[in-house]
Amino acid sequence: MEQHCKLLPDDDSQTSRPKFWAVARKIQWPVFGILVIYVVTLSIFPGFIAESLESKLLRDWYPVLLITVYNVSDFIGKSLTATYVLKSINKATWACILRLLFYPLFAACLHGPKWLRTEMPVVVLTFMLGATNGYLTSVIMILTPKTVPVSEAELSAIVLVVFLGLGLVCGSVLGWFWIV
């Protein structure tokens, strides 16, 4: 019974395990991409969509419609990877960085010309926000573990999840700036 309570001595096999930060450095661009995906998404959705927009036509149903559009498009984006996955992790990472363009686009819908402050541009942008969120998250999660040795594949997925969570936290904090 006592043998289960003793710590195992350190041996050389323990030092051959991949380290978190070493793997994170190897996949730094996909990690940055997943972080950007969720910082952009959570800083815009749901705060901006639920609080900052008004519709004379849809009134109280407008935020409900936008949240539904986002969730359906996110599902569609995730489902698209069943039929087509980008072949290049670099292209996927650049696509993640291009999502930063959603900031000026959504800001234009809030403060821009009158034709941009209508329902249709916001619905289209919300659809694009959700679809790119779902698709790029899935692509990064699929491709990144394939870019490292098999012994580091599981840890690379863990690194991605940690930075996904960090992106969720940072994005939700930044989301308050839309409301303020």
Image (cartoon, rainbow, N blue to C red):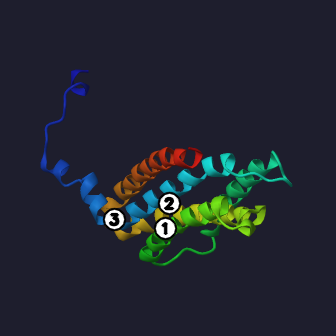
Q: In this view, does 2 lie above or below 91?
A: above
Observer able to see residue 76 = no
Q: Which residue is drawn at 81% across and 48% down?
A: 61
> In this rendering, would 44 be left or right of 58?
left
Please, is residue 69 above or below residue 7 in the view? below
Q: Mark 3 points at which residue?
A: 27
Q: What is the residue that sits farthest to the top in this orientation?
A: 1
Work out whether mark 3 precedes mark 2 in sequence or the reverse, and give the earlier one: 3
Q: Name the residue under label 2.
A: 37
Question: Disc 3 residue type?
Answer: Ile
What is the spatial separation of the Cα atoms under label 1 and label 2, in whole angstroms? Answer: 6 Å
Q: Nearer the viewer, residue 112 or 124?
A: 112
Q: Mark 3 or 2, which is nearer the eye?
A: 2
Q: In which quadrant of the rendered view does residue 89 lie?
A: bottom left
Q: In which quarter of the image is residue 156?
A: bottom left
- Rounded to the nearest whole Å, what is the CA distance between mark 3 and mark 2? 16 Å
Q: Where is residue 66 in the image (x, y as percent from the top left)?
A: 73, 54
Amino acid of disc 1 = Cys
Asked whether the residues under the numbered discs 1 and 2 touch, taking CB atoms below 8 Å apart as contact, a structural biologist would say yes
- Measure the alpha-carbon separation of dots 3 and 1: 15 Å
Q: Mark 1 points at which residue?
A: 96
Q: Earlier in the sequence, mark 3 or mark 1?
A: 3
Instruction: Label 2, secondary structure: give it.
Output: helix
* Image quarter of residue 6: top left
Coordinates of residue 52 in the picture (x, y in percent) = 66, 49
